Amino acid sequence: MTISRSWPHPEIRFDLQTLRAAQPLTHVLTNIVVTNFTANVLLAIGAAPAMVIAEEEAGQFAQVASGLLINVGTVTAADARAQLIAAEAAHKAGTPWALDPVAVGFLSLRTRIASELLAFRPAIIRGNASEILALAGVSAGGRGVDSTSGSHEAIDGAKALAKSVGAVVAVSGEVDYLTDGDAIVEIPGGHVIMTRVTGVGCALGATMAAFLGAKLSPLRAATAASAVFARAGERAVANARGPGSFAVNFLDELSRIGDENDAD
Amino acid sequence: MTISRSWPHPEIRFDLQTLRAAQPLTHVLTNIVVTNFTANVLLAIGAAPAMVIAEEEAGQFAQVASGLLINVGTVTAADARAQLIAAEAAHKAGTPWALDPVAVGFLSLRTRIASELLAFRPAIIRGNASEILALAGVSAGGRGVDSTSGSHEAIDGAKALAKSVGAVVAVSGEVDYLTDGDAIVEIPGGHVIMTRVTGVGCALGATMAAFLGAKLSPLRAATAASAVFARAGERAVANARGPGSFAVNFLDELSRIGDENDAD
Amino acid sequence: MTISRSWPHPEIRFDLQTLRAAQPLTHVLTNIVVTNFTANVLLAIGAAPAMVIAEEEAGQFAQVASGLLINVGTVTAADARAQLIAAEAAHKAGTPWALDPVAVGFLSLRTRIASELLAFRPAIIRGNASEILALAGVSAGGRGVDSTSGSHEAIDGAKALAKSVGAVVAVSGEVDYLTDGDAIVEIPGGHVIMTRVTGVGCALGATMAAFLGAKLSPLRAATAASAVFARAGERAVANARGPGSFAVNFLDELSRIGDENDAD
């Protein structure tokens, strides 16, 4: 079963209002390239980000947070300890969390850490096609952070990974595909310029964690985040002269989408 | 005694000119979320930021810097060593410094480190109401980086903390309250959107350190930074469509406020 | 022999097209202040940045990357291990790399690390006059990250350094001077506002690494990056109200310069 979801859909609009009312405290352990942008995306959409990264504190905070993102994009051995502690604490406390396996496959440390993190049962795994295929054991991964496969090529791998982990798997690409192992949700839209600003994909994973923190089901959380990103991206590109103004507009649009003045 | 200060006030305009003439070398040890924004804020206002974070170099640099900021927002054990070394070196060398106790209270490592840092006598402590109350020992702190108390609720705690440490304490909120333990300066203005961009509060602490570096007294440094931020924020929001364009405008306004074309 | 190069020059336009066709995988080990901006600059110009910073992965990735940048701006002992591993791997694998010796001279750790890195033969060394003079052994370096000398004062030091290391040395300033030890290329243009946005110089070093990754000679890579930056900077300042909008415009202009609509 494949269904297509895009903005404006009453369910997605409702879920966005839910997030804004909840202001979910979203614990973010992400890579150093995108930390600032991720925090600004979460603030723009209405969540409350908190980057608590020390191994002495990450578990303590994951217990009280509403949702958690772990992104291995620039993971070091010290970061990895904090990430494993946070994931374990989240798992024990029932804090739902999302995993972003950036560039898993070729690179040794992150591939091992991502594999260990799976034991703590992420609710959502979000990546590009190469990353999902690598995590599913289908391929050796892509070229750095870019995908060498189209998102549709990873659907079977995503379904297998979803079933084996018990997670929703989100494959980002020209069309986003989300699956719980059975149903497939496809999210069209967005714009290619979203790949020319660093951190859009990483911030999408964080936004999924925020929706999890607003107590949405994993499939619904991943769907809402993807559909909001796709539409905000389309709006942001309309008045953009390039990737610099696109990123600024994107934050503005995330803060406005679905508000009382948004008839669309 | 409570006095109110806002832009344009001749004293604040004069202090801003002093900062721009001095271009104070401002040593910044801050959290990884706001490093870039903080550097850009300091450059925009006319200071010279330098993020020297290694424990081998932090003390060396704190001795020659004009002012220092220490912010514990994402402090790890390794960062903490560098922060303590920097604070001690600043204390010994007479470099005035500001402490930003982000999310102190609930989280264990930073609460311990902030307490140890106090021994090296910060000239200014800047935080939101929850952080100031936690540091004053009045409460257990807020929810992550957000305050769960209004800034006026922290005035008594701020005065007590100011007296016990011998520092100026700045409580950020809808109105900013600054106190040396006796006098209270209130800074109205600003805009709620300043809480929807990550790092505005952290950059305010850094700007206080820059004014310290321009040889202003702690109360005057905290006042000038707060008043300039409040007014630049009001100007920046005028043409903003959301938090993305606000942040861009804010940097622009910081670079223009009080210059020869600014009649206000 | 001194030649002057500026946009539009047929060779530079051609080299930019070469970079965009190659989309060089550019491995970046840089300071925490500029990581995000550097990634966005590289994406804007058409390269594929990857910040792989763990010591377990940095050597692995430097072997497969097309070009590498090492910037010591906030280097810690742990970062230094990864940087030395990456430089050695790049040297062995033939991956050309650029070194940015930020604030070398006064600060102890980075000065030692930069000296050790030279053994792995960078193709390009880029810095301001103070940094180049310090690395050349001529002076003790500048004040933090700012230069205390004009770029023309470093030409002799740059030539000596270029000869002793066997690298192209690029001195950034009001005019950029590039030398392989014999020829000198001077790049006029740019704008002083480029010194009021953090990371422009650091991103220039990364862009040189990207041009190296597109298989340009070191002198040509440094020339192309500098000339494109100077011209994009001039264009970006035209509609800027301050450093915030300048940085946004600069990314936009980098993405547009030399494309099919760019007659200049």
Image (cartoon, coloured by chain):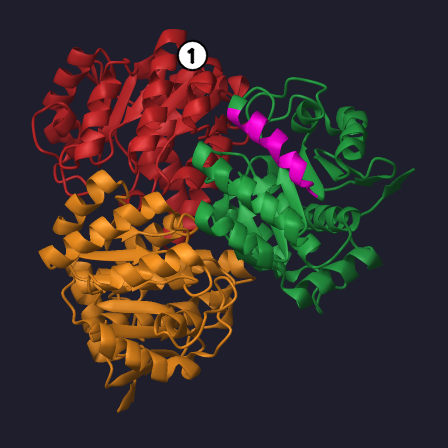
Chain colours: A green, B orange, C red
Binning the other alpha carbons within 10 Å of mark 1 as few (below 14), some (14 to 19) or many (20 upward) gives many
The residue segment tinted magenta is A109-122
> Where does residue B246 sit, x and y in percent of width and height?
48, 61
Residue lying furthest bottom = B1
> Where does residue A213 sit, x and y in percent of width and height?
67, 56
Using the rendered image of the protein, determine whether residue C235 is visible from the camera's viewpoint.
yes
Q: Is residue C152 magenta?
A: no
Q: Nearer the viewer, residue B8 or B51?
A: B51
The residue drawn where x is 45% and y is 13% is: C63
> Where does residue B106 sit, x and y in percent of width and height?
47, 63
Question: Height in image: C166 above or below B148?
Answer: above
Q: Nearer the viewer, residue A145 or C152?
A: A145
In the rendered structure, the residue with mark 1 lies on which chain? C
Residue lying furthest right = A1
Q: Tag 1's secondary structure?
A: loop
The residue drawn where x is 35% and y is 37% is: C31
Specify the amino acid type for callout 1.
Lys
Q: Name the residue under label 1.
A: C215
Question: Height in image: A241 above or below A7?
Answer: above
Using the rendered image of the protein, determine whether residue A101 is visible from the camera's viewpoint.
no
